[in-house]
Amino acid sequence: MNILFVADPLESFKIYKDTTFSMMREAQRRGHRVSACEQIDIAWRSGERVTAEVRDITLTGEAQAWFRTDGTRRVELRGFDAIVMRKDPPFDTEFFYATHLLGQAEREGAKVFNKPQALRDHPEKLALLEFPEYVSPTLVTRRPEDVRAFQAEHGDIILKPLDGMGGMGIFRVRADGLNLGAIIETLNREGTQTLMVQRYVPDIVHGDKRILLINGVPAPYCLARIPQGGEVRGNLAAGGKGVAQPLTVRDREIAEALGPVLAARGLLLVGLDVIGTSLTEINVTSPTCFQEITDQTGFDVPAMFLDALESLAR
């Protein structure tokens, strides 16, 4: 197959942990041809098809110069057997526009994973609203008074922006409410920005678990991202320690309930975030943790992903 990865600049990859790199490596190992581009490279012109300026690459196996560019070309996206959308968050306006261009490419015959419409329909923080039975007490609002009432009811809370990533902009306020006003001002910007508030889950000390769903099926291991050094954030980008572990009964219950629903909507790869027994986020833009789980358990997550991609693309 010819596979195009729409991703961040290749030069920025940290290949010892990058999930997109692990996908590319497994694809090349299987004999597939690998190409890459960025969102900025995709264009549509009236009377023509959606195209992109792509780089055809070969992975070298080296740690530094990890890829070689074999050539660049402008090509119609429908000419690829599969397009894997792997642009990292945030879900901003440029990401939104890119999904529309990829949606047009779909109408022209391209196969895009995750499906562009599904990416738009499932913003990371808000997708969980559909599954309240698995969620700890949560509030989404622009009204500061709603936040204060929620904190008065639940005491220990977490506040986060809807467009954050990697743990950025997450605050904890304890039962005494210390500094709540300043945090609301920072995130809410005088009522102009919606934010999410959740009851603090003490089980965060055991990790914020990333559960991977591939075509609706959970990988048998998750990655518990454990906060370090007094942090409340377990995100690896915020310094959390990743520890792979088997899914618990509750983890599997959540995964098996959501998996078929999300897969039917065109979400090939989903990352569920679970703290304790509560679902906290549904990640669809660029879920990670493939390499950490594979390295620690021996379970080949990239192979599971490529098996599913091959099945759906053919």
Image: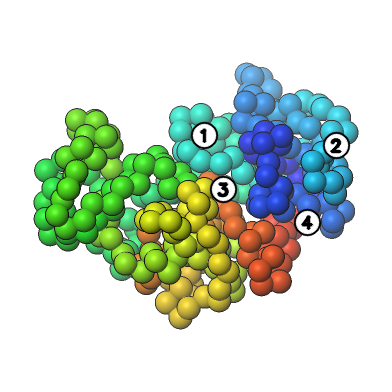
| Residue 68 marker | 2
Q: For the residue labelled by badge 4, is the local secondary structure a helix, a strand or a loop?
A: helix
Do the CB atoms of the residues marked 4 and 1 lie less than 8 Å apart? Answer: no
The mark nearer the N terminus, 3 or 4, is 4
Q: Position of residue 104 (x, y in %)?
A: 59, 34
Q: Find the distance from the CA under tag 4 to the CA under tag 2.
A: 16 Å
Query: Is residue 221 at all visible to an observer of this figure?
Result: yes
- Mark 4, residue position: 26
Q: How many marks can you see? A: 4
**At 73% across and 26% down in the image, what residue appears?**
53
Do the CB atoms of the residues marked 3 and 2 lie less than 8 Å apart? Answer: no
Identify which residue, 162 or 101, lies in the foreground.
162
**At 85% across and 37% down in the image, what residue appears?**
68
Horizontal side of residue 67 vs 276, given as left or right: right
Q: Amino acid at mark 3?
A: Ser
Q: Amino acid at mark 1?
A: Phe
Do the CB atoms of the residues marked 3 and 4 lie less than 8 Å apart? Answer: no
Q: Quadrant of residue 156?
A: bottom left
- Mark 1, residue position: 95
Q: Position of residue 143 (x, y in %)?
A: 16, 40
| Above-or-below relation of 78 to 51 | below
